[in-house]
Amino acid sequence: MSSKSESKLAGQYFDAAIGLLQRVRDEESGNIAEAGALLADAAAAGGRLFAFGAGHSSLAAQDVVYRAGGLALMNLMAVPGVVGVDVMPATLGSALERVDGLAGAVLDSSPARPGDVLVIVSLSGRNSLPVEMAMNARALGLKVIGVTSVAYATETRSRHVSGSFLKDHCDVVVDSKIAVGDAELSLDGVDAPFGPASSVVTNALMQAMVAAAVEQLAARGVQPPLLRSGNVDGGHDWNGRVFQEYGERIFYRH
């Protein structure tokens, strides 16, 4: 195969991802705006913002924390052993998602308080950890935004004792539209489907919610506490001023 040849499957993957992005743009616009309003409400009222995800869903949560162009108030709600695939063996992270009581312990020791907002990212929304995280967060007085594939709630069974899914315990649900199994491609002779698109779509949904929150804050005459890139002139000084002004609501620097 020459360097100038094209991959048919690579092109199909891009087409699938673009199609999903167009779907969430068109079909979830109202929920994205509602989620942005919750974020803006908390930011304007002196509250704090948190994001949580387990395994690969954690990538989308991390993508809105401490980054150029992001809201400085967004903090990661980290659960030991489930943030990405850094735990060894990696399969332990999947097992921890099914452990009862872990979410409550994390929330009880976190700085979250009533009026704050927690965004929970879980593709399936069926495991104990995201379900309990949502249930406990709302019991503590937090607003909960769930970013999940609603299809799992009708095509799979919950692993939580209640039989419920993440979507059942949220103030706002944003549906990623990802099909059960998270694999967009197949090929004759290859025994399993491949080409997951959940990270592409969910990261875009998270950034769209932040954009909606910024829009809402600006409409209210509130200057959004945004971070600049440290790789542009003046970026570090800008961020230093933001950290100084909002330090009591930013926990990734402690």
Image (tube, grey):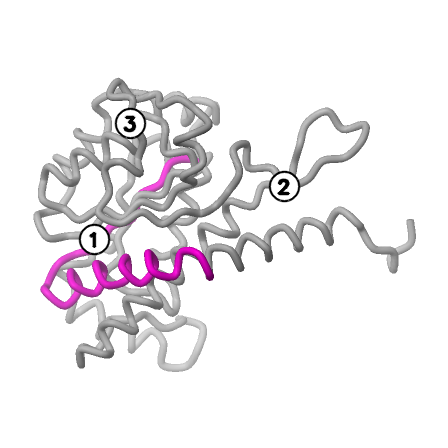
C-alpha separation, residue under disc 2 versus residue under disc 1: 37 Å
First reached walking from the N terminus: tag 3 or tag 1: 3
Element class at badge 3: loop
Element class at badge 1: loop
**Residue on which disc 1 sits:** 251
The residue sitting at 26% across, 36% down in the picture is 168
Looking at the rendering, the stretch of residues picked out in magenta corresponds to 26-55
- Determine if residue 145 is in view: yes
The residue sitting at 44% across, 47% down in the picture is 176
First reached walking from the N terminus: tag 2 or tag 1: 2
Q: Amino acid at mark 1?
A: Phe
State left or right for residue 153 relative to residue 189. Answer: left
Judging depth in this view, the residue of 74 and 21 nearest the camera is: 21
C-alpha separation, residue under disc 2 versus residue under disc 3: 27 Å
State left or right for residue 85 relative to residue 106. Answer: right
Above or below, 236 against 60 in this view is below
State left or right for residue 25 relative to residue 48. Answer: right
**Residue on which disc 2 sits:** 184
Q: Position of residue 125 (x, y in %)?
A: 36, 34
**Residue on which disc 3 sits:** 164
Q: Amino acid at mark 3?
A: Ser
C-alpha separation, residue under disc 3 versus residue under disc 1: 31 Å
Q: Position of residue 112 (x, y in %)?
A: 14, 46
Q: Amino acid at mark 2?
A: Glu
Q: Position of residue 7 (x, y in %)?
A: 80, 51
**The magenta stretch spans residue 46:** yes
Judging depth in this view, the residue of 193 and 68 nearest the camera is: 193
Q: Specify the farthest residue to the top.
A: 161
